[in-house]
Image (tube, rainbow, N blue to C red):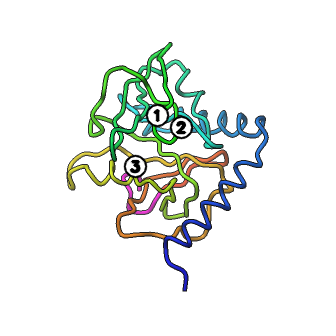
Amino acid sequence: MDSVSDAKARLRAEMRARRAGLSAAAVAEAGAAVARRLDAFPAIAGARRVAAYRAVRGEIPLDGLLDGPRREVFTVPRVVGDDLEFVAWCEGQSFARGSFGIPEPADGEVVAFADHDAVLVPLTAFDGRCHRLGQGGGFYDRALASLPSGGPRPTAIGVAYSFQEVADVPQDRWDVPLDAVATDAGIVIADGGLLA
């Protein structure tokens, strides 16, 4: 019997290969579709602060949101040790290659994770219950798990291509489910999540 980590590694490899096979036009089209959906989604449309990300390695780009009329509500992450911190997004912001070769904000106002109304989370696969398979570093799981239980927390929304949905995502005890997943084909709402 395969271990959870073996199953996760196989699923990551499969989905990364599928993303790598997408044309630039297909990536841009999916990014535009997701941006339109998220822009109209109440958890984002009414938010004062939203954690987003800069797409790498075939992830759905969020440029339509980050460069849109509400750009001042967004933050983007940078890695600090084993954790993420989120920096306010602003026009003309300078980026440097950070951990894992990901462009990270070089400077700017740091916004506490708990002060976000929503967080947009990249992923490699998800299932209908909004369990997420990330890149394997556990950064978003740690950020979400760090919030006090029972208190307010950001709505966690995964961002994916519709083909990244699978029947079941292999889970470890530390994996934190999302409240929803936005794809190029629609939005999946998790049973029992903040939006249910």
Q: Which residue is mark 1?
A: 98
Tag 1's secondary structure?
Answer: loop
Q: CA distance from mark 2 to mark 1?
A: 5 Å
Q: Is residue 32 left or right of residue 140?
A: right
Tag 3's secondary structure?
Answer: helix
Ranked by sequence position, the earlier of labels 1 and 3 is 1
Task: Tell me the amino acid under the disc marked 2.
Answer: Gly
Say which of marks 1 and 3 sits in front. Answer: 1
Tag 2's secondary structure?
Answer: helix
Disc 2 residue crowd, few under 14, some 14–19, many 20+, Cα 10 Å: few
Relative vertical location of residue 133 with respect to residue 39 in this rendering, above or below: below
For image coordinates 47% across by 17% down, the residue present is 93
Residue 50, position as x, y percentages in the image: 40, 33
Query: Which label is found at residue 101?
Result: 2
Q: CA distance from mark 1 to mark 3?
A: 16 Å
Is residue 9 visible in the rendered image? The answer is yes
Residue 25, position as x, y percentages in the image: 78, 35
Relative vertical location of residue 101 with respect to residue 143 in this rendering, above or below: above
